[in-house]
């Protein structure tokens, strides 16, 4: 029960990302500053955590072994994940971004063929390409149905161009996040923990965030004090607190598949907390009945998908 409560609390802090990104966008803040400032602020926080845990030297050795792969997959896993989400915040409400983001569960299954595993074939161990787990994707279709209903509810409220400017970046992010992070896990082969890997990817993706920051500074100047503070809150809430809570919850439940599935299902709370937060914090937020139904179907689909993994 404690692990589930920690998972729910983690989803609350994760939801801050979607609400604050929308708040910054509505306040005239650049999506480039929103994206880059999160990782710039995360860097010293993660450095402190990894250093205090005595894990910095191991991370440095790993990054020196394959620097270009670290740079590329960090760009994919962090750069092509978070920058598009910040961009989409300018064209759609936070609840819509959070709901559509749940497509990452389906995307995670679709990128499986890009990975290999060792299997015994003809009395020898062979590297075999993995296959899409179609049999376990049944409940994913429920999530997809909810997303389609949400898209339909938005189609009657905004132009087609704004719909595309919101949906396409989010879909890019849903594929980039699992692909980049899984490739990094494959590269590290269990030699690094989640904190080390997150810090390493933050360091390796830093050139992108510095380029975006310099470009935005050269064209429009420094970010406002409000955007800087809100970006810092996102870095602390989502990048540190939520991650620590969720990893703690999964560690507590790792020996019980049913409990672990229940913990993973708590992340559907992101959608609920995002909607509540947006309705309270951002003036003028509206959601139609169709949008609410679609959002509910996504939450139900996430819970069924997670619990279905142990059935």
Image (cartoon, rainbow, N blue to C red):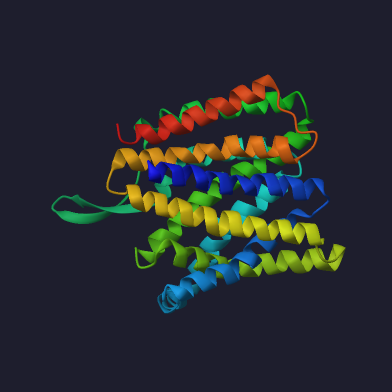
Residue at screen point 70% across, 40% down:
166
Is 252 left, or right, of 160 in this rendering?
left
Tell me residue 47's x, y (percent).
53, 72
Is 251 left, or right, of 31 in this rendering?
left
Asked where in the image residue 220 lies, by quadrant, the reply is bottom right
Is 13 left, or right, of 191 in this rendering?
right
**How many dots with numbers?**
0
Asked where in the image residue 224 lies, by quadrant, the reply is bottom right
Which quadrant of the figure contains the N terminus?
Answer: top left
Location of residue 61 with respect to 172 vertically, above or below: below
Residue at screen point 39% across, 38% down:
262
Tell me residue 9's x, y (percent).
51, 45
Location of residue 162 with respect to 173 vertically, above or below: above
Q: Is residue 16 visible?
A: yes
Location of residue 223 with respect to 25 vertically, above or below: below
Residue at screen point 43% across, 54% down:
247
Tell me residue 276's x, y (percent).
65, 35
């Amino acid at each position: 029960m404690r692990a589930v409560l920690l998972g729910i609390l983690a989803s609350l802090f994760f939801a801050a990302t979607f609400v604050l990104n929308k708040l910054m966008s509505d306040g005239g803040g650049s999506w480039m500053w929103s994206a880059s400032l999160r990782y710039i602020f995360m860097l010293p926080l993660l450095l402190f955590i990894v250093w205090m845990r005595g894990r910095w030297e191991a991370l440095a050795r790993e990054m020196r072994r394959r620097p270009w792969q670290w740079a590329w997959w960090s760009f994919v896993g962090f750069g092509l994940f978070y920058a598009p989400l910040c961009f989409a915040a300018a064209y759609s409400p936070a609840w819509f971004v959070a709901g559509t983001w749940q497509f990452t569960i389906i995307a995670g299954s679709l990128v499986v063929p890009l990975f290999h595993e060792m299997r015994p074939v003809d009395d020898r161990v062979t590297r075999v390409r993995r296959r899409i787990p179609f049999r376990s994707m049944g409940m994913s279709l429920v999530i997809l149905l909810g997303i389609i209903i949400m898209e339909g509810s938005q189609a009657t409220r905004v132009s087609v161009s704004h719909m595309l400017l919101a949906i396409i970046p989010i879909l890019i992010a849903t594929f980039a996040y699992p692909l980049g992070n899984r490739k990094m896990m494959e590269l590290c082969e269990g030699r690094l923990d989640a904190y080390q890997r997150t810090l390493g990817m933050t360091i390796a993706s830093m050139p992108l965030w510095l380029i975006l920051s310099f470009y935005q500074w050269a064209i429009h100047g420094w970010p406002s004090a409000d955007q800087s503070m809100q970006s810092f809150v996102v870095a602390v809430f989502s990048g540190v607190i939520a991650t620590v809570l969720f990893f703690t919850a999964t560690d507590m439940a790792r020996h019980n598949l049913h409990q672990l599935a229940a913990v993973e299902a708590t992340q559907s709370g992101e959608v609920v907390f995002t909607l509540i937060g947006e309705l309270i914090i951002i003036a003028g937020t509206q959601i139609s009945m169709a949008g609410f139904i679609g959002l509910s179907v996504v939450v139900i689909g996430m819970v069924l998908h997670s619990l279905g993994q142990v059935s």
